Image: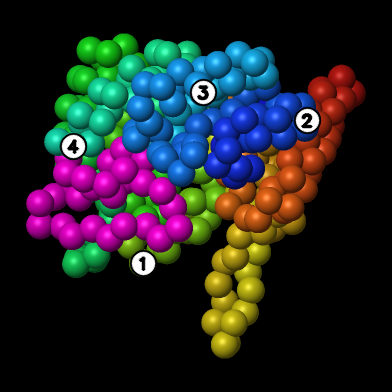
Amino acid sequence: MKKSIITDQISMDFEQALQVARTYGYNLVEIHAVWGKTIEMLNESEVFKIRQLLNKYEISVSCLGSTLFLVCPLLEKYEVNVIENYLTFNGSYIEHIEALKKVADISKTLNAPYIRVFPFRYPANEKPKIGDETSQILIEKFANIVDLAKKYDIKLLIENCPHSMGPIGIINKFIIDGVKSKYLNLLWDPGNSFNTSEEILSDKYTNILLKDELREILPFIRHIHLKDYYPRVHDGKTNLELVTFGSGIIEYRKLFSILINNGYKNALSLETEVNINDTLLSLKTFDNILNNEIFYNKNSKLNK
């Protein structure tokens, strides 16, 4: 497995982010936003500067974390809200399609193997139950998107997001099964699955444990995001709050063990969404957890 981190979790200053990543032994980074812009908004000179800095620090790109089709309605009747404190590309479906063409070119320049996309924003004006019916519409939309990916020879990854029509990985696997293309696979975020409200899911998708979800979608996973949560009580109500990676209640050791035993070789990318000090601590903790699991599993096999 390969270690990665999303650069804006360290700093919007791309060079500073690369310096820190190198200091902590990371030679892979994911790019979502730099210099206050999402990847979709960068101009040619900025992309060229990114390439120069990557070469300077001898760091490669694990994935381009675009926000395409996130703040975008699945159906015309759906109204969508922007996401606070998170930089996104906003616009119509056609505008997102045009932006994907631009990101495709950027991926070639930066030698990025994958481009993240999202399964459309959950509507603000309606409360549909996410299940087979909505997934069928998603299949139709993504069939068109994948046609473009094939034309540009780029590989797309759908990320599960609790603010989207595909909040858990199993729903996005349904889309992939329907589209059936080598140009579309999964970016799995177990933290996002963990933080999804069951109120928006049809009954067949509720009460699924992360380890069971992982086993079902593992053949399609090409990239993984890592964040952690801990329940806090405020005014008598329990909410999940983001914490330093490894200090929350998500059982990452079990998930890593499944990945190791099944030969997962792609990137695990930190998306801590906490302050810089906790992010730096997360870099260290991630190393410790991953190295311990690799050591444990290796020795368990030797002792059999």
Q: Amino acid at mark 4?
A: Glu
The reply to whether dot 3 and dot 2 touch (C-beta < 8 Å) is no
Dot 4 or dot 2, earlier in sequence: 2
For the point 62% across and 30% down, the residue is 15
Image location of residue 110, percent across then percent down: 47, 17
Q: For the C terminus, which image quadrant?
A: top right
For the point 44% across and 52% down, the residue is 86
Q: Is residue 136 visible?
A: no
Residue placed under numbered mark 1 in the picture? 199
Q: Return the residue nearer the eye: 81 or 168.
A: 81
Dot 1 or dot 3, earlier in sequence: 3
Residue placed under numbered mark 4 in the picture? 95
Q: Is residue 101 a member of the stretch shown in magenta?
A: no
Q: Is residue 81 above or below residue 90?
A: below
Q: Is residue 134 above or below residue 13?
A: below
Name the disc covering residue 23, or none: 2
Image location of residue 276, percent across then percent down: 68, 51
Image location of residue 228, percent across then percent down: 63, 53
Type of secondary structure dominating the magenta stretch: loop
For the point 18% across and 60% down, the residue is 79
Residue placed under numbered mark 3 in the picture? 50
Mark in front: 4 vs 3:
3
Q: CA distance from mark 3 to mark 2?
A: 18 Å
Q: For the N terminus, which image quadrant?
A: top right
Label 2 element class? helix
Mark in front: 1 vs 3:
3
Label 3 element class? helix
Q: CA distance from mark 1 to mark 2?
A: 43 Å
Q: CA distance from mark 4 to mark 3?
A: 24 Å
